[in-house]
Image (spheres, rainbow, N blue to C red):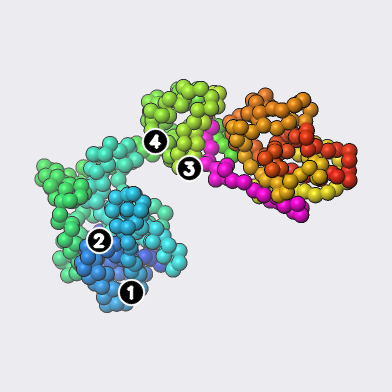
Amino acid sequence: MFQKFKAHLLKNFSHLKNQKILLASSGGIDSCVLLSLCLKNGLNISIAHCNFQLRGKESEDDALWIKKLAEDKKLECHIKKFDTLIYAENKKTSIQMAARKLRYDWFNEISIKYEYEVILLAHHADDVLETFMINLMRGSGLKGLVGIPQIRGKIIRPLLPFTRMEIINYANENNVKWREDASNAKTDYLRNKLRHKVIPNWKATDPNFHNRFSNTLEYLGQAKIALDNVIKDFKTKYFIKMEHQIKISVDELKLLNPINFFLHALFANYGFDNVKDLNQLLHAQSGKQLLSKTHRLVKNRSHLLLIEQSEDFNKTYTIEQNIKKIQVPIKLKLGLNNKIKIADKNTACFNIKLLKFPLTLRKWRESDYFYPKGLNGKKKLSKYFKDEKFSLLDKEKQWLLCSGEDIIWVVGKRVDERYSIEYHKEDRWIIRNYD
């Protein structure tokens, strides 16, 4: 196995020779064999170990064993305890997912802090098979079936071409020591059930099983690349980037076949993975929308608008009388000024004697109304927006300047008749929108 691993490094990861590497080690056979192989190849290795505190004294003993291993081999070692059960409860997630999130976040954190260029993980060919079966049982799409990636960002998994049996044989032949995790022998978790009860029967049917499985993964990977290119081409043509949104033709989406596959592939990364909801939105009336944690997908006539969720929709910003300029949430210049002439809609002049400071900037509410200058009387803001042909996004982007409860300016659009002043320059307070 050593010669095969050496050739694998030379062919695919020759750059590792000159890099500072962090190797994640549980103390189990896989990571200990990977450490042995890396040291024999002269790589610059440090060790990281996660103590998830899930197995009582065994977890503590694992951490002490890793620390002793690092000392014996004169390697830098990072060990961290995690309150995994508490984290899983707070995040309302499984223990396995909690441990995974904590592990990868910490690896990223220390790789930045200590300038590790690469993080090595000890996943191998049998892990790929187990993951494939788990995703298959869960009804995963193609993405979940193509296997564990060999490279993802800083993370490299150099043992993926090697089976568990090859790793065991290497450990025995080279006197590699490791810690045996008793929980691996249990069948409480789905992965362990597959490892001990299902996969051995699969392997027994064909001595060439792993090679055939590897070929299947390669074909699936090629299919995914081809489909990814189709998706990328569609997004290049029809995901039209505009200010604060992406505009997508509904008619072009309806032409896709099979539409359920494409809708999921196009929108899942934005948090929209319910194909039934996406189909309904295509045929919904304007104004209907779907919400994810990060985005909104809005039907607007013949298009869908993909909009990143805004954090400031419900925020209110105050403006004191002595302030001459603000940058947030929009850029405004303010103050008494007798020289500026009203030249465009981005300049508003108010009777300062009527203003109640501090003024506020906010977004619109359903009950809002004002007295738009030049339009004779009171008008609901929603009706004003409709008359001015505001889209849903236009309405949500629009800032309102208020004095007390009164809207005095739909910023950049129209001032309120009650507060407007143009000719009494001694009382004129001017605001200039230069966003």
Chain-order first, disc 4 or disc 2: 2
Give the number of marks.
Answer: 4
Front tag of 1 and 3:
3
Amino acid at circle 4: Asp
For label 1, the residue is 75
Q: Is residue 107 above or below residue 404?
A: below
Q: Dot 3, crowdedness within 10 Å: few (<14), some or many (≥20)?
A: few
Please say if the residues under marks 1 and 3 sit with CB atoms less than 8 Å apart: no
Q: Quadrant of the C terminus?
A: top right
Residue nearer the viewer, 276 or 330? 330
For label 3, the residue is 294
- Disc 3 is placed on an element classified as loop
Please say if the residues under marks 3 and 2 sit with CB atoms less than 8 Å apart: no
- Disc 4 is placed on an element classified as loop
Chain-order first, disc 4 or disc 3: 4
Chain-order first, disc 4 or disc 1: 1
Q: Dot 4, crowdedness within 10 Å: few (<14), some or many (≥20)?
A: some
Q: Quadrant of residue 431?
A: top right
Checking the image for residue 54, the label placed there is 2
Residue nearer the viewer, 171 or 344? 344
For label 4, the residue is 273
Q: Is residue 75 above or below residue 316?
A: below
Q: Is residue 33 visible?
A: no
Amino acid at circle 3: Thr
Q: Residue at x 55, y 45 (%)?
A: 311
205 to the left or right of 4: left
Give the image location of residue 112, x and y in percent: 45, 64
Front tag of 2 and 1:
2
CA gap, disc 3 to disc 2?
33 Å
* Magenta-colored span: 304-327
